[in-house]
Image (tube, helix red, strand yellow):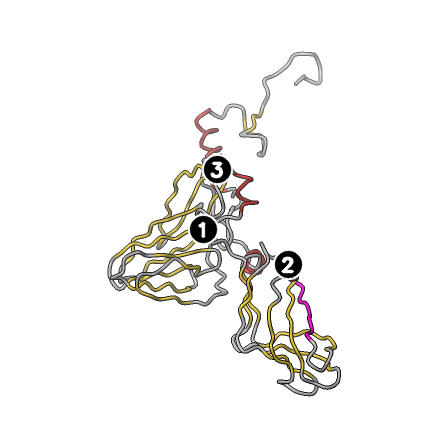
């Protein structure tokens, strides 16, 4: 820096905390700069690497209870298990997360499986795992193994439970050695991310096409957006298709596993009508579920 008149230089008046922040006065001590660095690192949030980290989405149901709780998905993307056969575990959706209680004191395992394509991006990386239980935050380092695979749980949290309420508020995994502020996603964005792995349709869901007649096997498709992780397995009970002429004219509704893909669902049905008919609504007794989760 130079004076307007003359060529004498003066000491630079500002230093940067780091490249992401504004200048600070040069007389600021190294200790104050370090404190500023630590503060900004803690309040500016890294993105979370996991889905449904605040347990907003529960497509499979909002309450699960059994003795000797075998590992199963509860809230989307999260499994719970308990090997204590003397304890009945109940897992319930609540406003501030996942509530877990036991008929006696015990321990459950809360696990998260990451899809291989996402896992490959962080193989061998140092990450930080943080989680809040009953409002108390725990932070621990997590080194992602270089040979990690999606069928082995990336996150496995052991949580003591009892007859009193235990609520897991949120879980966050982020790159680096510093735990930054937890910022949840919007519920709509979270649901879209979850639907890559599991998806539900209501009891009545629609399509519109013209079916052939006289016992011919017809096939129609449903576009899946977003696409699912793999070709899903489908589950529906007592499925019928309501047509313009009869609610039960089409029988033998089946899921075509050969033709279906992660982004297209194909369903077959046979009509007993003697003339072509337009199909408007599929009526599945318990709705339709599509499962492309990691097991």
Mark found first going from the N terminus, 2 or 3 = 3
The vertical placement of 47 against 12, above or below, is below
Tell me the residue that label 3 is attached to. 147
Callouts 2 and 3 close, C-beta under 8 Å: no
Rounded to the nearest angstrom, the CA distance separating label 3 from label 1 is 17 Å
In the image, what residue occupies the spot 46% across and 67% down? 61
Magenta region: 217-225
Tell me the residue that label 2 is attached to. 261
Q: Secondary structure at mark 2?
A: loop
User: Depth check: 261 or 134 in front?
Assistant: 261
Query: How many residues crowd mark 3 within 10 Å: few (<14), some (14–19), many (20+)?
Result: few
State the image quarter where residue 102 is shown.
bottom left
Q: Secondary structure at mark 1?
A: strand
Tell me the residue that label 1 is attached to. 112
- Magenta-colored segment: predominant secondary structure: strand
User: Depth check: 38 or 15 in front?
Assistant: 38
């Amino acid at each position: 820096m130079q004076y307007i008149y003359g060529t004498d230089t003066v000491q630079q008046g500002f230093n940067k905390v780091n490249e992401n922040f504004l200048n600070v006065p040069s007389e600021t001590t190294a200790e104050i700069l370090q404190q500023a660095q630590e503060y900004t690192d803690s309040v500016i949030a890294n993105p979370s690497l996991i889905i449904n980290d605040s347990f907003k989405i529960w497509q499979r149901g909002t309450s699960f209870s059994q003795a000797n709780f075998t590992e199963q998905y509860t809230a989307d993307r999260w499994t719970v298990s308990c090997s204590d056969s003397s304890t009945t575990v109940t897992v319930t959706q609540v406003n501030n997360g996942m509530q877990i209680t036991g008929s006696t004191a015990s321990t459950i395992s809360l696990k998260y499986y990451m899809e291989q394509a996402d896992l490959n991006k962080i193989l061998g990386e140092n990450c930080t795992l943080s989680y809040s239980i009953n409002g108390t935050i725990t932070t621990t380092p997590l080194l992602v193994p270089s040979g990690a695979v999606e069928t082995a749980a990336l996150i496995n949290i052991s949580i003591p439970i009892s007859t009193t309420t235990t609520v897991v508020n949120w879980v966050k995994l982020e790159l680096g050695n510093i735990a930054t502020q937890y910022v949840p996603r919007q519920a709509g964005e979270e649901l879209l991310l979850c639907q890559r792995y599991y998806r539900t349709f209501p009891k009545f869901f629609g399509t519109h096409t013209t079916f052939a007649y006289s016992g011919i096997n017809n096939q129609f498709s449903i576009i899946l957006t977003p696409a699912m992780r793999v070709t899903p397995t489908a589950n529906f009970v007592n499925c019928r298709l309501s047509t313009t002429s009869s609610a039960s004219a089409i029988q033998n509704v089946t899921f075509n596993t050969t033709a279906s893909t992660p982004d297209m669902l194909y369903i077959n049905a046979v009509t007993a009508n003697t003339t072509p008919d337009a199909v408007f609504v599929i009526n599945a007794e318990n709705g339709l579920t599509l499962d492309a989760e990691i097991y």
